[in-house]
Amino acid sequence: MKRVLIPTDFTIKSLQLLDYAILNYPKEQLAIVLVSGYRIKESLWDMRNFSEQREINKLCSEEFTKSKRTFLREHRDVIDRLNIHLFSGHNMFAFKNFLKQNDIKEGIITESQFLSYEQPNTFDPSHLMKSCLEKTIEIPLTTDKSYNRSQVSVSTIYNL
């Protein structure tokens, strides 16, 4: 089974990269890990009470969750599991440790800025993925600067 890391900004648009994982690993059973960079607030209270799952639940819209479930249902023969993680480190050494803990060596990113990361405290981990993964597949997707979340629908994603 191949473990593949894919960045997400918790929008339906980011789920397009799941299709590219299937296309680039056609004969593999996949375990996909969606990752978003996350800055934990630095107060002692926030650090002690941080819950990755609680923050992920806050970041995932109902629309995103439904689209993710639909995708998994349609591709259950190829995707063994799909997990979401928040990377809260500050440098490459922390990211390499994250990769080692999750046994990830490969990933899919876009060649240019495609995801928006408008959610509070989130950031794009693509530059860390490109530097730290053994193999990174870069997809030539771009976004229009006037991107609006309401412009993207599930039908847009699945009609590549």
Image (cartoon, grey):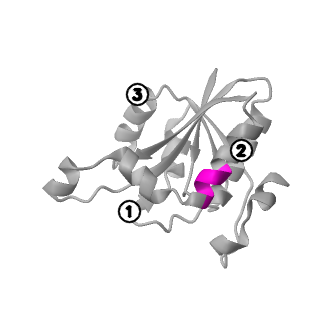
Instruction: Give the quarter of the image for residue 4.
Output: top right
- Cα separation between marks 3 and 2: 26 Å
Range drawn in magenta: 63-67
Q: Counting other residues with Cα less than 10 Å from the Cα at mark 3, is it few (<14), some (14-19), or many (20 or more)? A: few
Q: Earlier in the sequence, mark 1 or mark 2?
A: 2
- Cα separation between marks 1 and 2: 27 Å
**Residue 35 left/right relative to 148:** left
Q: Which residue corresponds to the image point at 71% horizontal and 63% vertical from the top-left?
A: 142
Check disc 2 and report its element: helix, strand or loop.
Answer: helix
Check disc 3 and report its element: helix, strand or loop.
Answer: helix
Q: Nearer the viewer, residue 32 or 71?
A: 71
Q: Which residue corresponds to the image point at 54% horizontal and 60% vertical from the top-left?
A: 61
What residue is pinned by disc 1?
121
Q: Position of residue 10 (x, y in %)?
A: 55, 57
Q: Give the residue type that dot 2 points to.
A: Phe
Instruction: Give the quarter of the image for residue 34.
Output: top right
Q: Give the residue type that dot 1 points to.
A: Asn
Q: Which residue corresponds to the image point at 70% horizontal and 24% vertical from the top-left?
A: 29
In the rendered structure, are the residues bearing label 1 and label 3 in contact, judged by CB atoms less than 8 Å apart? Answer: no
Check disc 1 and report its element: helix, strand or loop.
Answer: loop
What residue is pinned by disc 3?
101
In the rendered structure, are the residues bearing label 1 and label 2 in contact, judged by CB atoms less than 8 Å apart? Answer: no
Q: Is residue 157 magenta?
A: no
Q: Give the residue type that dot 3 points to.
A: Gln
For discs 1 and 2, the disc positioned in front in the rendered view: 2
Q: Is residue 36 placed above or below 106 in the rendered structure?
A: below
> Dominant secondary structure of the magenta stretch?
helix
Q: Earlier in the sequence, mark 1 or mark 3?
A: 3
Mark number displayed over residue 71: 2
Q: Which residue corresponds to the image point at 60% horizontal and 56% vertical from the top-left?
A: 64
